[in-house]
Image (spheres, rainbow, N blue to C red):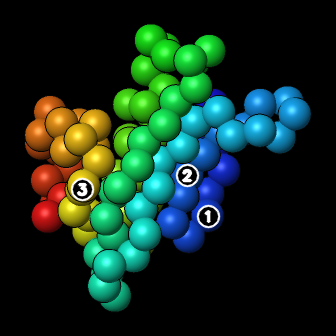
Amino acid sequence: MDFKYENDRIYLENEKGECIAEVTFPKVSENKVNVNHTYVDKSLRGQGVADKLLTALAHDLKKNNRKAVASCSYAVDWFEKHPEFDDVYK
């Protein structure tokens, strides 16, 4: 998957340039973001796209020495199931 990266968003577009999957994470302090939204279009559900988005986010946070809190229920659950990323969560 060829995700696109912005300051507070990682996303995937279809061939028409429409967003078909995304995770958003606005900055809440100098080195902390809030993972507040995860979206995957119906056409991609069941293919592990949300997991790939959160994995990409976790690696991006680690690379940029940032941490995350989560208000998105999917992200909370994802981080709980992936203790290997405890160093970037909370």
Please say if the residues under marks 1 and 2 sit with CB atoms less than 8 Å apart.
yes
In the image, residue 76 sits, relative to residue 20, either above or below, namely below
The residue that disc 2 covers is 10
Helix, strand or loop at label 1? It is strand
Q: Label 2: few (<14), some or many (≥20) within 10 Å?
A: many
Element under label 2?
strand
- Seen at 31% across and 85% down, the residue is 29
Q: Which tag is nearer the camera, tag 1 or tag 3?
A: 3
17 to the left or right of 34: right
Asked whether residue 76 is in view, the answer is yes
Number of marks drawn: 3
Left or right of 48, for residue 67: left
Residue at 28% from the left image edge and 37% from the top image edge = 74
Q: Amino acid at mark 3?
A: Ala
**Residue 70 disc label:** 3
- Amino acid type at mark 1: Glu
Q: Secondary structure at mark 3?
A: strand
Q: CA distance from mark 3 to mark 2?
A: 15 Å
- Tell me how far mark 1 sits from mark 3, CA to CA: 18 Å
In this rendering, does residue 82 appear at all?
no
Q: Are marks 1 and 3 in contact (CB under 8 Å)?
A: no
Residue with the mark numbered 1: 6
Quadrant of the image containing the N terminus:
top right
Question: Is tag 1's residue or tag 3's residue first in the polypeptide sequence?
Answer: 1
Few, some or many C-alpha atoms within 10 Å of disc 1 (few <14, some 14-19, many ≥20)? few
Q: Quadrant of residue 52?
A: top left
